[in-house]
Every structure is written in structure tokens, then in C-alpha cells.
Image (tube, rainbow, N blue to C red):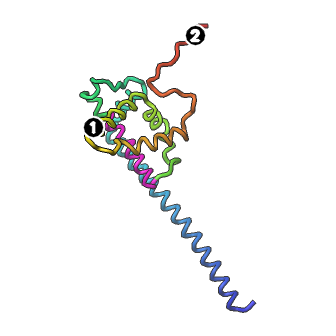
Amino acid sequence: MPYMEIIQLGLLIFAVIGLFFNFRQSRTRNRQKSIEYILTLVQQYGEERNELLDAYGAVESGQFMCDTSFHNSPRKKEIDALLEYYDTVARVYRAGQLRIADLEFMAYPFVTIYRNVEIRKYLTFLDESYARKGIRAKPFYAFRRIGRRMEKRYAMKTIRPAATPAPASVPL
């Protein structure tokens, strides 16, 4: 084998090794950026903690009702803040800064909120309100898309959505 071919082969091997290390460093940098985004989201949750916890507690326990009294209540602001928070998380995911696996730690609240019948009523109300005003955009669109995806990935099929009455138990 002539010396020129040996040199070219050596350079090719060197280039492949360099590409491998570059790829590995890029992945590490992207993971670090994902962690930074998660920490930022957790920090945002901490800043609005009481309002978000109150809203989430009402949704999870089935106490949240999207009726006529809701639209003029302080609870509306809390629910909007809760949906905005999860919509922001979903937008960060859709922008490619997070993987769906990065969101696993919030799968339970995400799916709980997404599946809630009263939340869905509220989203339908907002859709109709936007449509009456001639706005084609759907409020909390990213939350809905990622909620559907999270539900498919993490939710068990046998669980009923929140706020759906459980069947009466049969006495033994």
C-alpha cells in the first residue's frame, strides 16, 4: 500500500473520530440546555406556586366547575395561570428544547389537567369566544397538543377523566 493511501486512511479515521467527539459534545450541551429549561420552568412554578396549587387542587379534586359563576370569579385567573404555565412547558417542548421523556416528572398533573371534563368545557368556551371574535387561533394550543401526546404515552386507558362520576358501588 503506497504511503499516500495510508496517510489518507489515517486522516479519514482521524476525521471520523473528531466527528464522533463533536457529536457527543453537542448531545451533552443539548442535555444541559434541557436541564436549564426544566429548572427555569420549575422556578416559574415556584414563583406562582400558591395560585397554581390552588387551581390544580381544584381541578384534581373535581371541585373546579366551569359554570356561569366561574367566568367572573377569582378562580378564573388561577385556572388561566395554570393553563398558561402548562402551555409554556408545551411550547418549550414543541420548540425542540425538551424531549417528551424530560416531561415525565410532570406527566400526572399534565394528564390530570388535560383530561379534566371541566377544563375541556372551559377550552371549548374559549374556542367559541375566539371564533365569535373572528380569531382562528386556539387558546392553549400547545398544551392541548402535548396533553394529547402525554396522555397517549403515560395515561392508563382504564382511568376515567376527572370530574366524571364514579359508578355506584355494589354492597357486598
The quarter of the image holding the N terminus is: bottom right
Provide residue 162's location: percent of width, then percent of height.
46, 26
Under circle 2, the secondary element is: loop
Provide residue 117's location: percent of width, then percent of height.
42, 28
Amino acid type of the residue that numbered disc 2 sits on in the rendered structure = Val
Neighbours of disc 1 within 10 Å: few (<14), some (14-19), many (20+): few
14 in magenta: no
Chief secondary structure of the magenta span? helix
Mark 2 lies on residue? 170
- Viewer-proximal residue, 32 or 159? 159
Range of the magenta residues? 79-97
Tell me if 117 is positioned left or right of 50 in this view: right
Snapshot quadrant of residue 110: top left
Tell me if 48 is positioned left or right of 110 in this view: left
Mark 1 lies on residue? 132
Cβ atoms at labels 2 and 1 below 8 Å apart: no
* Residue positioned 57% across, 32% down in the render: 157
Q: In the orientation shown, which residue stands out farthest toward the left?
A: 72
Of the image marks 2 and 1, the number of the one nearer the N terminus: 1
* Residue positioned 27% across, 42% down in the render: 134
Provide residue 131's location: percent of width, then percent of height.
30, 39
Tell me if 96 is positioned left or right of 69 in this view: right
- For residue 120, above or below residue 40: above
Provide residue 29's location: percent of width, then percent of height.
48, 62
- Viewer-proximal residue, 124 or 18? 124
- For residue 171, above or below residue 108: above
Under circle 1, the secondary element is: helix
